[in-house]
Amino acid sequence: MHTFIIHPNIKNQSGVSIVTAIFLVVILALMGVSMVSLISTSQQSISQEFTSAKAYMAARSCLQWGMYQAVYSATPGSNTTNFNDANSGLTNARCITDTNTIINDGLIFYNITATASIGAIQDPEYSRRQLQIQFQP
């Protein structure tokens, strides 16, 4: 025969499992909320990095276009080009090139400043890049 001995303090611990379960649920919920916040921030950061890279590449293209205009155009100066091409992903992109001619000791140098911006200023993913080059054709 087995006899069970019940400890006298067992009745005082009857609600411990419910308190522990509630504590674990709260901790797991807080961890879930923090993970969702971290993923959301990471996604926004990646999207901004992608927009920044598009603006940089657009600025490089603007430099090349400005170099072409400086060498082959009759009137180099300030040019503005808007890109709106849904196929390439460049929507609301703007390119401004300023070309200055410097003549030094009979040599012609061109200074080109290209500014490319993607999106509107109030957009959270707005990006603007400015590149400069000086060259002699």
Image (cartoon, rainbow, N blue to C red):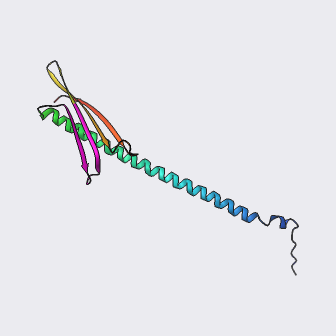
Queried whether the magenta region covers residue 84, the answer comes back as yes
Q: Residue at x 72, y 62 (%)?
A: 19
Residue 102: which quarter of the image? Answer: top left
Q: Quadrant of the C terminus?
A: top left
> Whole-percent x and y of residue 96?
25, 37
Above or below: residue 36 compared with residue 106: below
Number of numbered labels in the structure image? 0
Q: Is residue 58 left or right of residue 21?
A: left
> Whole-percent x and y of residue 124?
41, 45
Q: Residue at x 22, y 38 (%)?
A: 80
Residue 10: which quarter of the image? Answer: bottom right
> Whole-percent x and y of residue 77?
19, 31
Q: Is residue 36 left or right of residue 113?
A: right
Q: Residue at x 64, y 57 (%)?
A: 27
Q: Residue furthest front?
A: 122
Our reading of the magenta stretch's main secondary structure is: strand
Q: Residue furthest bottom?
A: 1
Q: Is residue 79 left or right of residue 127?
A: left
Q: Residue furthest top?
A: 105
> Whole-percent x and y of residue 16?
76, 63
Q: Quadrant of the N terminus?
A: bottom right
Q: Residue at x 83, y 64 (%)?
A: 12
Residue 70: which quarter of the image? Answer: top left
- Magenta range is 75-98
Queried whether the magenta region covers residue 43, the answer comes back as no
